[in-house]
Image: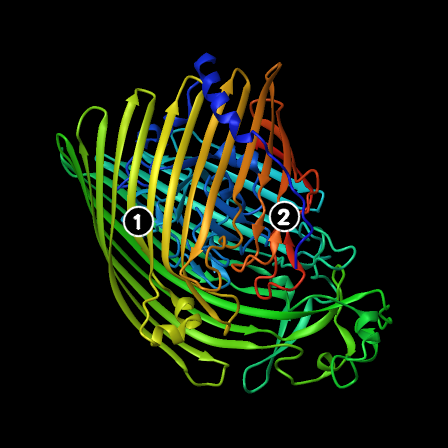
Amino acid sequence: MKCPKRTWVIPGALLLFPVIAVAAQMGSEKQAIMEEIVVTGTASGGEVKKLNASFAITNASSEDIRRYSPKSTADMLKVVPGVWVESSGGVAGANVFVRGFPGGGDAPFLTVEMEGAPIYPPPTLSFLENTTLFRIDDTVQRMEGLRGGPQSVQDNGQPGLTTNFILKRGGDQTEGDVKYSTSDYDLQRFDAVVSGPLGDDLYYMVGGYVTSSPGIRDAGYSAVKGDQFTAKITKDLDNGTLSVYTRRTNDHGTWYLPAALNVPGVDNEYTQVGTLNRKGTIVYGAANKEMSVDLADGRGWDGTVSGVNFDLTVNSTWSMSDALNFTTGEADTVGLVPNGGADNVGALLADPNVDTSAVVTGTITGQATGRTIGSSEYIQQFGLWVVRKAIRSLTNNLALTGSFDQFDLTLGYYAATSSVGEFWALGNDRYYVVQQGGERVTGIQCNDATAVPDGCGFNYDIDADGDATSNALYAVGTWHASDVLDINLGVRSEKEKVNYSVDEGLVGVVDKTVDYETTKSSFTLGANYDIAENQGVFVRVSRGYKFPYFDDFRDNYASFTGGNDLTKQVTQYELGYKAAFANLSAYLTLFGNKVKGDTFVAFPGGPVETFTNTAQGVEVDAHWFYQNLTVGINATLQHTKITNDPANEGNRTQRQPKYQVRLTPGYDFNLGNGMTATVYGGLSFIGSRFSDNGNTVTLPSYHKLDLGIIFYASNNLSFQLTGDNLTNEEGLTEGDPRNPGAPNGRFIMPRSVKFTVGYDL
């Protein structure tokens, strides 16, 4: 299946970078973004100027987040170069890829941190990636996105992307804001945050939101519902800082899936979920048990994330820091998943090979309305999938840092435990009418049969429990060789243990068991050289690992029991240039990487692909200022290749574009009488991709236009109007990952407009 090809040419788009670099010598004296402070990627979590960092990191302030107005946490990650994000699945359940690293979905090389601590050690479980466990609201002060760099030896040893969300903290003055938001898809959302002093050197911050909508693709009922509450207490000590935080979230939304591209009228506003099919019953397990299902449960997170942080100065030489995090809750998924392509009813009835002993038996009627389905309509198999996950984790990262005349040394100990209890009932395929909220049909043999667990297709049911522990010792040293040269070396030794038990088929017997233990050593070596006071270069080589977790063993059980190590080795090279001129801040990073021992399984029980993946590319992260005008450029060009795989040798890695470019202009107006306004926008160009490793299905290139305006009527009152995908582009993020030949694809979100009124306290 080849999707309809549309090509958007961006000749010279990246040539804007050198033009802006020249223009930077002529602007105002506005403070550059590179003067910002970052904490992610530093060995002890200490602060460093972005300009002095020997790694590529992107900042997004609370104002940046407000302007971008992300529809999900994953959507916000699009501001980080080198990262390809498919946030088309809804409020949860995104796919996030990093610098050409391989992956078939979810986010295998992403760590989401809160206050510097990972919120769940496994970066991905099937039907659960880390962004599902975090919701952005007004309690977030900023986001930091570090790709590659020294993280392969620090914290949880993530070699890919680490995104750290820093919460706001209270100060000596009471302040905060309240906001109400609505949209053209009937969004109703209320946000509030307030912070201030509780006593001498004791501060608080509390905030959260409540939201509801039928979804950006109208389900006809409240398909998106959520609420969140966050609290943080901070105590400034004579020799440091202590903070405690907790966040309670219950937020779910429709799981949007690939749509039938061969059906007239199916576009980016289509969703199969609706009032006529919201309720259903599935049959599962060897005993043919039944379960009632409500699609309104959707996909999301109902749980709590809490933590304690402290930074203490021990003496004139040594300091100590610790970041502890505890996460517990449920991350469930309920959805209608397509099984194969859509069929025209008339063609089925006219086909002599389709008779009463197979698919269609006589007249096909709608179950809910009793109407006869016309020969011009389409039907398609959808599986009512149910996945229940109860997760729990405890992580702690303790670091001791000594500062000497020309040398800094950090010694760290990272420990983590994580567990999962899960129940799956996949399949339960039945035919439905392909239309918005299309109903299940009768008159089809496999639809009408009772007590048939696999219906018209397959079933895959499991009951599983797993526990994992990680213990790592690491050391990072920085030699200040001169006033302009720093050399950094880090090493890490980590032991991982995994125990996992699976009842596959729900037969009451454990048929897959795992008792796994391995130890790996990682390293990073980097140097930072200051060309001038406002310019620098860095170089880095690192080797890290992605350790296997529960799904890796279940999906690759035969390979594992055959003696194969499922750990993936990641080697990376980086060369970067950074600058902070009077009106330009910029990062330019060249990267190369190799991921050995990667595996890919398209569906449970399917064939296992094992291969090596290589990638090379360049990232641009720049902001240019001229008087009231700001222009941002976020761009990635990369080339990927699959090796050591006879079936796909030399092919490009699935789902990732060769190029993506995002331009973000903004202009500030002074309207007088205390009134100001900011007009801003985003124009994204996304290159074509292949839906599968076989490179048989092409996903066309597309572009996307966003615009917004914030009007400040006074120092306290503001109004914001944001338009997303204003040209209503029907870009595709994936084909059908379970059946590449099926004419299905998942659209980016359709055009939408959101209005927000806010008041600062």
What is the basis of the colouring in this image? Answer: rainbow
* Visible residue check, residue 309: yes
Identity, as a three-letter code, of the amino acid under mark 2: Pro
- The first of marks 2 and 1 along the sequence is 1
Image side of residue 650 versus residue 383, left or right: left
**Residue at position x 30%, y 52% from top?**
544
Q: Quadrant of residue 708?
A: top right
Is 364 located above or below residue 357 in the figure? above
Q: Quadrant of residue 304?
A: bottom left
Image spot of residue 729 (x, y percent):
68, 43
Circle 1 crowding by C-alpha within 10 Å: few under 14, some 14–19, many from 20 = many
Image side of residue 440 versus residue 121, left or right: right
Q: Quadrant of residue 511?
A: bottom left
Which residue has dot 2 on it?
A: 700
Observer-nearest residue: 479 or 685? 685
**Residue at position x 37%, y 48% from top?**
593
Circle 2 crowding by C-alpha within 10 Å: few under 14, some 14–19, many from 20 = many
Image spot of residue 51 (x, y percent):
34, 28
Front position among marks 2 and 1: 2
Tell me the SS state at disc 1: helix
Which residue has dot 1 on it?
A: 152
Q: Which mark is residue 560?
A: none
Image side of residue 267 versus residue 226, left or right: right
Identity, as a three-letter code, of the amino acid under mark 1: Ser
Q: CA distance from mark 2 to mark 1?
A: 34 Å
Image spot of residue 724 (x, y percent):
65, 39
Image spot of residue 241 (x, y percent):
28, 38
